[in-house]
Image (cartoon, grey):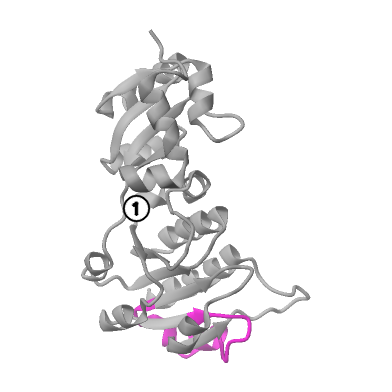
Amino acid sequence: MAFTPRTPRVVAARRLQRRRDRDQSGRFLVEGPQAVREALAGGVVLELFGTATALAHHPELVAQAPRASAVTDEALAALAETVHPQGLVAVCERVDVPLAEALAKRPRLVAVVAEIRDPGNAGTVLRTADAAGAGTVIFAGEAVDPYNGKCVRASAGSLFHVDVVRTPLDVIDDLRRSGLQVLATTGYGSDDLDSLLDDGVLAAPTAWLFGSEAHGLPESLLGAADRRVRVPIYGGAESLNLAAAAAVCLYASARAQR
C-alpha cells in the first residue's frame, strides 16, 4: 500500500521543507535520482520515498537505502519542491562538520560564502568549489541554510563531496592559523586576479571570501583579509554574477596550485 500525503511519515518528512524543522531535527530532504545516489554514497540517507514507477526504475538505489517506501504521486508531489519531480525523495542526516575538524585536514583551497542569502548562488558556489578541488566550503554569518532545497539541488551532489561548515562571521583568524592566505573578492580590490596568478601568489594554500551579490562582503571581513582582489572586466559588463566570479577565482587557484 503506497503512502499518501496524510501518512505520518510523509507528513514528518514534508516538515523538513522548513528551516526551523531542519534545524531541530538535524535532517533535510534530497530530491531526484542523482542527488539520492550521491547521498547514499555518502551514507547519510535515513529513508527513501518513491513512486512505484521510480522505485522499479532504480532498484540499485532501493537496495542501498536503509528503508524504502512507496508513495502515491500526490505524496511525492507534496514532498518535492520542483514543478516536475523525478519520483524520488530521501530524508538525510545533515553533513556539516565543525570548523576545527575541517581545517585540521589542512585543505589547500577553501571557499567562504559570507552572508549570502540566495540559495541558488550558494549551491552553485558549492558545486564549483567541489569541481575546482576545494576541500571545504564555509557558510559564514547569516548565510543561507546549505540544506535549503534549492541550495541542495543547485549543488548537484557536491554537498556530499566537500566539508560543509557553518560558522559565525569572524572566521579569518582560524583560516590564517591553519596556514591559509585569505583573499577577499570585491569589485574595488587593490589587487588584480591576473596579476596574482602571474606573480605566483595563488600557488599558496588559499581561502577565498565571497559576499552577497547585493551587498558584497561585510567591512569586517574586507578589512581583515590579506588581500582585496578584483576580477578584471575586459568588456562592457558592469560586474560578474557571484557564482561566475567564484568560478573564476577558484579555478585560478586550482590552476596555480597544480
Q: Label 1: which residue? A: 161
Q: Can residue 209 be seen in this snapshot?
A: yes
Residue 68 in percent (x, y) is at 32, 22
Circle 1: residue type: His
Residue 34 among magenta residues: no
Q: Which residues are magenta?
A: 184-206
Q: Secondary structure at mark 1?
A: loop
State the residue at coordinates (32%, 23%). Answer: 62
Graded by Cα atoms within 10 Å as few (under 14), some (14 to 19) or many (20 or more), the crowding at tag 1 reads many
State the residue at coordinates (39%, 65%). Answer: 138
Please identify the residue farthest to the right as the structure is shown: 236
Q: Quadrant of residue 244?
A: bottom right
Q: Nearer the viewer, residue 219 or 186?
A: 219
Residue 195 in percent (x, y) is at 54, 88
Residue 153 in percent (x, y) is at 50, 44
State the residue at coordinates (42%, 48%). Answer: 147
